[in-house]
Image (cartoon, rainbow, N blue to C red):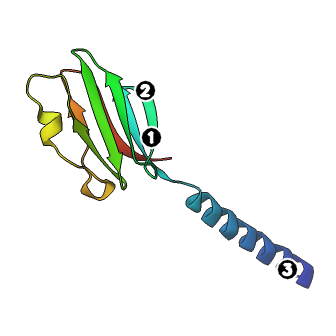
Amino acid sequence: MKRKEIFIIICLLFIGVGLYFYQKSSKHEELVVYHHKKIIDHIDLSKNARYTYHGDVGVFHLEVKNGKARAYDVDCPNQICVHTGWIQREDGKSIVCAPNGISVSFETV
């Protein structure tokens, strides 16, 4: 191989590695809210806020704080989603309110 060809190959390798790390760093975590397996909201975890959704049997309230999420004050008979408590990405948990048909999970986009 000639010097020019080796130089071009090395440059292409550096560009490829750079693009790989750029693509990897551009991904971020968010909370995705589903109603009957259809996405109804994307939530930025860096913002502390409260959200309200209308499910099959009533209202579903979601609070996001410090990268964690919890259901509170939900209209459903058994309150399992409320008793789930705070969830975070590291736990690998989601929030599911079966009576309302709403589920909340962490996803990388």
Few, some or many residues within 10 Å of mark 1 (<14, 14–19, 20+): some
Few, some or many residues within 10 Å of mark 2 (<14, 14–19, 20+): few
Q: Earlier in the sequence, mark 1 or mark 3?
A: 3
Cα separation between marks 2 and 3:
50 Å
With 71 as the anchor, is 27 left or right in this view? Answer: right
According to the picture, the residue beneath numbered tag 3 turns out to be 7
Give me the disc on residue 40: 2
Determine if residue 36 is in view.
Answer: no
Residue 86 location (% of width, % of height): 23, 49
Name the residue: 91% across, 79% down.
4
Name the residue: 25% across, 15% down.
56
Q: Nearer the viewer, residue 107 or 33?
A: 33
With 103 as the anchor, is 109 left or right in this view? Answer: right
Residue 1 location (% of width, % of height): 86, 81
Q: Nearer the viewer, residue 10 or 80?
A: 80
Residue 106 location (% of width, % of height): 36, 46
Tally the marks.
3
Few, some or many residues within 10 Å of mark 3 (<14, 14–19, 20+): few
